[in-house]
Structures are given as structure tokens and as C-alpha cells.
Image: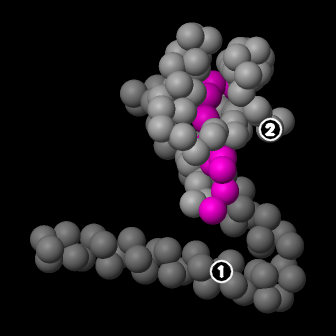
Amino acid sequence: MTGNAAAVLQLLGEVRGQLDLLIDAVSTGARADLAALLDRGVAGTRAIPGKHGGPTRPMQSVFVSVPDHPGELARLFADAGSAEVNIEDVHIDHDPGRPVGLVELLVDEASAEQLLASLESRGWVTHR
């Protein structure tokens, strides 16, 4: 636990410094400073390698209503596979009091319309 404490403390100090700059920019209305901080954040995010260490690819979310019945999520994944679209990430918003959940499928931007059309043709309710 203490083997990397110095490095962690240094990083936390840097984060605190950036948060202090952000708080100052927001509280004083310094739009140029805020824009510069946001630009650095965007640049940092873009520097994170994409899948398998390659360049990042534009992604798009596809939202699908999924009935709250056994096997429906598996059927959604199978139908997405039948559409020959690779799902990069999944988020599920499920309210136990509702008969459906909302599933967000993150896919390559170039495949989103293909997935939407394919799922809709199979009877899925999508949200654009």
C-alpha cells in the first residue's frame, strides 16, 4: 500500500492544483481560463490509447428499451451480433418498478445506423 505513496501523493497534488484553477475560473467567470482548462482535458482524453492500444475511434450510443423478462438481454446481444456490429461497451439502467430497462450500447460510429435499423426490424424499441 505504501510502495507508491509518493507517486500517488504527487498526482493528487497535481489534481488538487487543477481543481483549484477550475474553482477560481468558475467563481471569477474567467472564461478564457476555463476554456484553457477544458482544452487541456480534451487533449488529455485524446491522448489515451484506444482499443488494443490503437488510435481512438468515434463511438456512438444506441439506446434500446429491453423488457424485464428472462433472456431479453441475451436476445438483444444476439440480435446485435446478427447485425454484425461489435458492442464496445454496455450500460444498463434498470428500475425494478418498471416493465422495461434502458440499455445503452456503445458502438463504432460508422455502425450505429446499421445497428439501429437491424434492431428496429427485429421489433426492438430504440431511442434516437
Label 2 environment density (alpha carbons within 10 Å; few <14, some 14–19, many ≥20): few
For the point 39% across and 27% down, which residue is it? 52
**In screen coordinates, is 38 left or right of 14?**
right
Cβ atoms at labels 2 and 1 below 8 Å apart? no
Above or below, 25 against 98 in this view is below
Relative image position of residue 33 (x, y in whole percent): 77, 72
- x, y percent for residue 91: 56, 46
Span of residues in magenta: 97-110
Q: Is residue 81 magenta?
A: no
Q: CA distance from mark 2 to mark 1?
A: 38 Å
Q: Nearer the viewer, residue 78 or 35?
A: 78
In this rendering, the label closer to the viewer, 2 or 1: 2
Measuring 22% from the left and 76% from the top, which residue is drawn there? 5
Which element is circle 1 on? Answer: helix
Q: How is the image coloured?
A: one colour
- Seen from the viewer's position, the closer of residues 85 and 94 is 94
**Which of these two is toward me, 13 or 54?**
54
Using residue 89 as the reference point, say whether residue 60 is left or right of it. Answer: right
Residue 107 painted magenta: yes
Q: Residue at x 24, y 76 (%)?
A: 6
How far across and how far down the image is residue 100, in percent?
Answer: 66, 47
Residue 127 — which label? 2
Q: Mark 1 highlights which residue?
A: 21
Amino acid type at circle 2 is: His
